[in-house]
């Protein structure tokens, strides 16, 4: 069974740092495109960052320069280092795999599975 | 960025009803549209990928259609476990896959 388990969330003051972890089982994180998606309380879903299997990373403009995505292949774990945290970063952070299906013309992609999420609260 | 707009934002229905959700993209996204179901306190769950493909294990009462800018998710006969929030997501604009704001389905 494929499973993603996030940890590391908590209450942090504005300007502080936090590192989230996503432990993968049933899949090899380094062979996949792994993402972080967040959801502010009562709000919709926002893509945050992706780490491709080849090592390329991308970030949403809202976190660029403050967040860093990485992985430890030996631990099969994805990370999100969050620095200079702001109140608007308060959210549940989900780890998810980008899955894909390709035909002769294009590839279709989606997020599956998802972890259970970890809550980050930025407040003084 | 591609904007995704869902309608309605909320919907009340009864068990056994047929319901349809709509998702509109701000530009053509071919068939790169996915649907997710989210229950309170839980992670989103994939229902439909590539506009009309049912994810393994998802009941056949769920179906998706559309291409270009307009998409629909239909539940043919509502079951009690279907009351949740539904999100659409475009996967056309790599890597910034944007979501709609969601449609909350509750019991009438």
Image: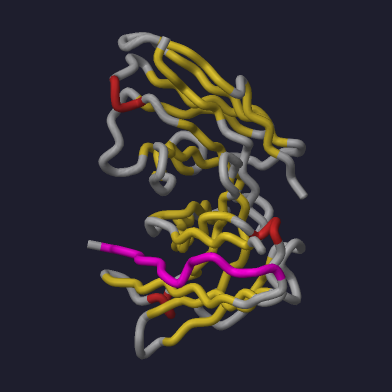
Write down the quadrant of residue B76 in the picture. top left
Q: The magenta stretch spans which residues?
A: A2-14
Q: Quadrant of the C terminus of chain A?
A: bottom right
Residue positioned 35% across, 42% down in the render:
B55
Residue positioned 67% across, 77% down in the render:
A83
Residue positioned 61% across, 29% down in the render:
B23
Residue A7 colored magenta? yes
Q: Position of residue B30 (x, y in %)?
A: 64, 40
Nearer-the-camera pick, B95 or B79:
B79
Asked if B26 appears above or below A104 in the picture, the reply is: above
Write down the quadrant of residue A6 in the picture. bottom left
Residue positioned 76% across, 36% down in the render:
B26
Nearer-the-camera pick, B105 or A120:
A120
Look at the image and name its color scheme: secondary structure
Give the number of callouts.
0
Asked if B91 appears above or below B53 in the picture, the reply is: below
Magenta segment main secondary structure: strand
Q: Position of residue A70 (x, y in %)?
A: 54, 81
Q: Position of residue A120 (x, y in %)?
A: 54, 62
- Residue lying at the far left of the rendered structure: A1
Residue B80 colored magenta? no
Q: Quadrant of the N terminus of chain A?
A: bottom left
């Amino acid at each position: 069974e494929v499973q993603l388990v996030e940890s590391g969330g908590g209450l942090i003051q504005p300007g502080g740092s936090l590192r989230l972890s996503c432990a993968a089982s049933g899949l090899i994180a380094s062979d996949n495109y792994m993402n972080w998606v967040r959801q502010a309380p009562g709000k919709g879903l926002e893509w945050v960052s992706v780490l491709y299997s080849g090592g390329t990373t991308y970030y949403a403009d809202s976190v660029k320069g403050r967040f860093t995505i990485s992985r430890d292949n030996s631990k099969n774990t994805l990370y999100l280092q969050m620095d200079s945290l702001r109140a608007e970063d308060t959210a549940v952070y989900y780890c998810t795999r980008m899955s894909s299906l390709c035909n002769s013309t294009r590839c279709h992609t989606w997020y599956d599975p998802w972890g259970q999420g970890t809550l980050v609260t930025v407040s003084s | 960025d591609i904007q995704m707009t869902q309608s309605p934002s909320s919907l009340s229905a009864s068990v056994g009803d047929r319901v349809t959700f709509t998702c509109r993209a701000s530009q053509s996204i071919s068939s790169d549209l996915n649907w997710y179901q989210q229950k309170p306190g839980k992670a989103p769950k994939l229902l439909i990928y590539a506009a009309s493909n049912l994810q393994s294990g998802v009941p056949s009462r769920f179906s998706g259609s559309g291409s270009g800018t307009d998409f629909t998710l239909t539940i043919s006969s509502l079951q009690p476990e279907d009351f949740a929030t539904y999100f659409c997501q475009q996967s056309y604009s790599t890597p910034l896959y944007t979501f709609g704001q969601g449609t909350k389905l509750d019991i009438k």
